[in-house]
Amino acid sequence: MKHEKISIKWKIFLFLLVFMAILLAALWLLEVSYLDSFYKFVRKRTAKSVKEEVVRLLTSESERGEIEEQLDLAAARNNLAIYVADTDGNVRYNAEYIATSRLNTIPKQDLDTYYRLAEENGGSVEIRFRGSRRAFHEPPFRKGAAPEEEPPEDSLPPEQGDAPEGGLPPGEGAPIFVQNHGLDRAESVIDVTLLEIEGEEIIFLLNCMLTPVGATASTLQIELAFISVLMLLLSVLLAFLISRQISKSMIRVSNSAKELAKGRYDVVFDGRDYKEIATLSDTLSYMAAELGKTERFRQELLANVSHDLRTPLTMITAYAEAMRDLPGENTPENIQVIIEEAMRLTNLVNDMLDLSRLQAGVLKLSCEQYNLTKGICDVLKRYNKLVEQDGYRIRFLYEEEAFIQADVFKIEQVIYNLIGNAVHYTGEDKTVTVRQSCSKDKTRVRISVSDSGEGIDEEELPYIWERYYKAEKGHKRARQGTGLGLAIVRHILELHGASYGVDSKKNTGSTFWFELKNVPQHFTK
């Protein structure tokens, strides 16, 4: 059973909705569920940063007025209380920007207690209060409680023996809690640090208020509820518009591709809304153009092969019927025509088979070292009859003999086909020139075959190596060969790893060439 697949439009739509849902969930978690924890985390980091800055100021050599200004600015900017005093309770610096903080009126007994706790914990201790802060030495019992009534377990201060022996490192002391009972559940944190300045020990107190954010969280919940509904509606609308806009170009490209599948190779892919879709459209347009060319080549191939097969078959049939029905037509000349047409038909079939085997990679090379110059001369001998009867001039120009490592039969087939192609397309002077030249370092040899015909347009040059490709309108029967020569030449040269090409311009003739590695003569057999 074939499963129905979801369209790209709805995929984008669902993706945007899921993204919006994740975004709303993150807002609810950060702004409501973890608001209190996040607020406390930020306040503690702020207090820690201010503490480090104050310690740096106190231990620096700055003027007193400058220190006071900086401490006051730090306390005001971060809503903190800063109190610095000596061990006798004499105030050195005081900057309070918390309404409930009364560090400047702290009892001497509390200050001594803070000093003792900090000293026992390695020079630093953190003390926390909940509710309205009272004197530290007061017992944390509720007012009006009976003397014999035991205080609640969670309101008792921790035992001093909880700290490990030897104290804790500065700034990492175990926090000391003093829990008071009251309606105000705000948490007040006092960080106590002992410093030594100019040989005198002083006490540095930093007070930070951690105000409950329950009411703020409730307000944010209501606001986020309205925001969530609004964002959900907007996200649905936005997701629909975006998915429709993105999928519109893809739908157009898909429809064009369906037309291409029906054989319309002139179809235009016009997806230009986005870079990726534009690239895809260009690629598909290029593919459509190439498929159109391939289809035209296929149709021409069928037409040309049919023409070249029909002509010799028609002549064989006509001459054979004439010899059968007409007295005196059974002559050697007519028999020779039948033989020549049958051989032409055989050559055409053999060339088609050779080309198919070359394209399939079935044919293997049988390479040996041989005299290329002598091989070209042997090929030219096959054209002696054509030269004598029709007045063609085939010149072979070379300065020295060249030797190569190659398949002798296939290289001679390449030369034969190139000369046949030049004879077929040469001009009225019926001249064909074959040149052999070596590179300056004698490592490579080039063979070029030139004609004096009309030449080939530059835009047609990449396609002349295709089967039955014709530069002119209308196919004509080749004087020599079968029309598959250049395609066979290309595949043979590629098997040998040779470089090849054609130089041609309109009305200036054409020169086909190939290069092979030159082998020194003393290495040949």
Image (spheres, helix red, strand yellow):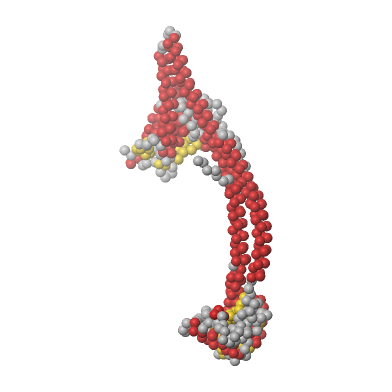
Residue at the (40%, 32%) spot, across then down: 412
> Does residue 358 appear anywhere in the picture?
yes
Q: Position of residue 103 (x, y in %)?
A: 64, 85
* Residue 84 drawn above or below residue 236: below
- Return the x and y of residue 369 as percentages of the image width and height: 35, 38
In depth, the one of 427 and 163 nearer the eye is: 163
User: 134 or 286: which is nearer to us?
Assistant: 134
Residue 121 seen in the figure: no
- Left or right of 283? Residue 399 is left
> What residue appears at the point 52 percent right and 29 percent down from the top-left corner?
300
Residue 303 x, y percent position in the rendering: 51, 26
Q: Looking at this view, is 61 or 505 the one in front?
A: 61
For this rendering, which residue is in front, 137 or 442? Answer: 137
Q: So how many labels did they put on this image?
A: 0
Q: Position of residue 349 (x, y in %)?
A: 43, 26
Q: Quadrant of residue 402?
A: top left
